[in-house]
Image (cartoon, grey):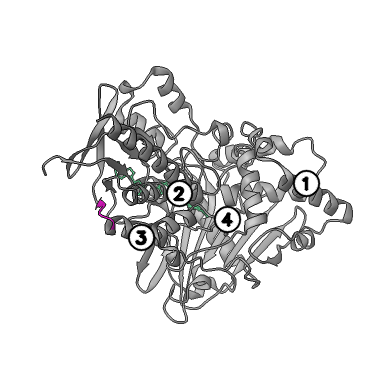
């Protein structure tokens, strides 16, 4: 293929790359989008197979109202295609929470609507007295009242540190440890308090627990349909092997299907893979390379997908945790030594609740997950799958007999699918570098790389919040900077 020229090249079609490329093309920047897989959507890919339609990984939308996708769809003129499969004021029973306190023999279950604004179901579930309830309400009200600047002040403080020394019921701490695992895919002593506070505020004030008709991947599909409609070029099944740099500025990329030239390259392949593999560390200052190597990957999820001959779950999401089952770094260290816990936290999504076409008539597809390390070589993954299966049978005794098929994935699959492993223990991250203490908010890596014309879009740089929301927000932020830069270059010509 001859060397074609573009105004900008975007690498990767997950929410970050898709949002960025689509906005650039809409704003008149001739854009080439290159995706290594033969499908689009990155980690938020949705699959259609054997009559089932589901997300490969368990996903939930936070926030329900005011997500980063909304202004993008509005700018594209396709707001009608933004179809959350749950209205913000939907008052059905949406989420079931199963909790086992230390000392209880069995899990107890509470139901709630989509948002967390009403703590009553939690108080009943936790079985706490009026004084503990008051402390919980005061704490949550304090989070809601915080200013953005106050939240920024906790970028470098883990949630565990943030809670330490506060006079709070243990049941609240245990829930927040579970929430860090299930919603942010981080241990409570690794997650940034600022990031977790932001996400909790989103859930309390703007709702959480949403999905989309056809799954999350629909969001990427709509954006990329508009991208191509507006004249953008999308090449799938094409891995970028090298980002070219001359005289301190990018000049294009080398890919499996040829070389392409552009003065701007936006990479959503991950900050570490971009710097250390696609560009090459020789093009950066040593201090920047050390900074990049020192960035800590976020954690991952193992997933099990259950294809069922008959429904076993009647709500949209089912989550389960016990005081002993959430993960912090100490518990993980024991797991790493080979002590697989008897229970794990579970996060389960029932696609059939959101979309009547998610499964053939009378059937159901569930996607479940639990937190694990991002290490593609982690040895504990098979043990975690076994425990997940056992727990699913505990909560849904009829599931085994109803199972047509199950399939399993872990950090190795996330890595193969989306993000190259360029450092030991890294590659399987759910949200990239996104939510780790010291790497969020004001301390988040900049979207603007120290090479002229190179930007990072996606969950590694810029923006905040849940994974897809922050990736799309980052893509939009990069698009704004790139348009500004292109206009500056045009004026100079
Ligand atoms: C198990 C799991 C559960 C999750 N749960 C949630 C949830 O409940 N809610 C939520 O909001 N988020 C969730 N997330 C996180 C969310 O999916 C990610 O944060 C988001 O997809 C990141 O978007 P991105 O654009 O940064 O990267 P990605 O989605 O990883 O996209 C990057 C793209 O770049 C492509 N690429 C990489 N290298 C190259 C190359 N060299 N050449 C060409 N293409 C390349 C990849 O193939 C991929 O398509 C979850 C993720 C996982 C894995």
Q: Would you say residue 235 is visible in this rendering? A: no
| Residue to which mark 1 is pinned | 139
Q: Secondary structure at mark 3?
A: helix
| Residue to which mark 4 is pinned | 63
The segment highlighted magenta reads 230-234
Left/right of residue 211 with respect to residue 481 in the rendered view: right
x, y (%) of residue 419?
37, 43
Instruction: Give me the C-alpha separation between circle 2 and circle 3.
Output: 14 Å
x, y (%) of residue 392?
57, 64
x, y (%) of residue 300?
49, 46
Which residue extends farthest front? 491
Crowding around mark 2 (Cα neighbors within 10 Å: few <14, some 14 to 19, many 20+) is: many
Name which of mark 2 and mark 3 comes first in the sequence: 3
Q: Are marks 1 and 2 in contact (CB under 8 Å)?
A: no
Q: Is residue 244 above or below residue 37?
A: above
Q: Is residue 22 above or below residue 389?
A: above
Q: Quadrant of residue 259?
A: top left
| Residue to which mark 2 is pinned | 472
| Pointer 2 residue Cβ closer than 8 Å to ligand 1 | yes
Instruction: Give me the C-alpha separation between circle 3 and circle 4.
Output: 20 Å
């Amino acid at each position: 293929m001859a060397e074609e020229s573009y105004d900008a090249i975007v690498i990767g079609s997950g929410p970050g790359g898709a949002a960025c490329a689509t906005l650039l093309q809409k704003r008149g920047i001739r854009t080439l989008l290159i995706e290594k897989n033969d499908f689009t959507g990155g980690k938020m890919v949705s699959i259609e197979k054997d009559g089932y339609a589901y997300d490969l990984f368990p996903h939930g939308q936070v926030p329900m109202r005011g997500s980063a996708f909304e202004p993008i769809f509005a700018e594209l003129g396709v707001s009608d295609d933004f179809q959350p499969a749950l209205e913000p004021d939907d008052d059905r029973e949406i989420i079931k929470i199963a909790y086992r306190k230390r000392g209880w023999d069995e899990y107890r279950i509470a139901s709630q609507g989509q948002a967390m604004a009403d703590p009553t179901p939690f108080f009943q579930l936790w079985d706490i007295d009026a004084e503990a309830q008051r402390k919980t309400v005061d704490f949550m009200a304090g989070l809601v009242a915080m200013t953005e600047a106050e939240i920024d002040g906790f970028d470098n403080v883990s949630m565990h540190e943030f809670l330490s020394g506060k006079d709070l019921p243990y049941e609240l701490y245990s829930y927040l440890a579970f929430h860090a695992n299930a919603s942010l895919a981080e241990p409570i002593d690794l997650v940034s308090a600022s990031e977790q506070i932001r996400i909790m505020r989103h859930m309390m004030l703007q709702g959480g627990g949403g999905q989309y008709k056809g799954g999350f991947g629909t969001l990427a599909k709509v954006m990329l349909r508009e991208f191509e409609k507006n004249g953008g070029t999308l090449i799938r099944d094409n891995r970028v092997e090298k980002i070219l740099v001359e005289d301190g500025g990018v000049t294009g990329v080398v890919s499996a299907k040829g070389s392409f030239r552009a003065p701007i390259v936006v990479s959503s392949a991950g900050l570490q893979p971009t710097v250390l593999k696609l560009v090459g560390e020789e093009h950066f200052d040593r201090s920047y390379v050390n900074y990049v190597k020192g960035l800590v990957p976020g954690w991952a999820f193992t997933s099990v997908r259950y294809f069922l001959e008959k429904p076993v779950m009647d709500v949209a999401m089912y989550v389960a945790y016990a005081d002993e089952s959430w993960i912090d770094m100490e518990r993980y260290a024991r797991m790493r030594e080979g002590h697989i816990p008897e229970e794990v936290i579970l996060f389960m999504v029932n696609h059939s609740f959101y979309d009547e076409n998610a499964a053939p008539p009378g059937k159901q597809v569930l996607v479940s997950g639990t937190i694990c390390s991002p290490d593609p070589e982690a040895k504990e993954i098979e043990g975690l799958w076994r425990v997940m299966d056992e727990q699913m049978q505990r909560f849904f005794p009829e599931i085994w007999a109803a199972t047509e098929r199950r399939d399993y994935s872990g950090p190795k699959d996330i890595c193969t699918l989306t993000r190259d492993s360029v450092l030991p223990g890294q590659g399987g991250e759910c949200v990239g570098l996104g939510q780790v203490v010291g790497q969020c908010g004001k301390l988040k890596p900049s979207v603007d790389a120290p090479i002229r014309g190179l930007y990072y879009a996606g969950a590694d740089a810029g923006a905040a919040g849940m994974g897809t929301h922050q990736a799309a927000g980052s893509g939009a932020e990069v698009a704004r900077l790139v348009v500004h830069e292109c206009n500056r270059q045009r004026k100079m010509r």
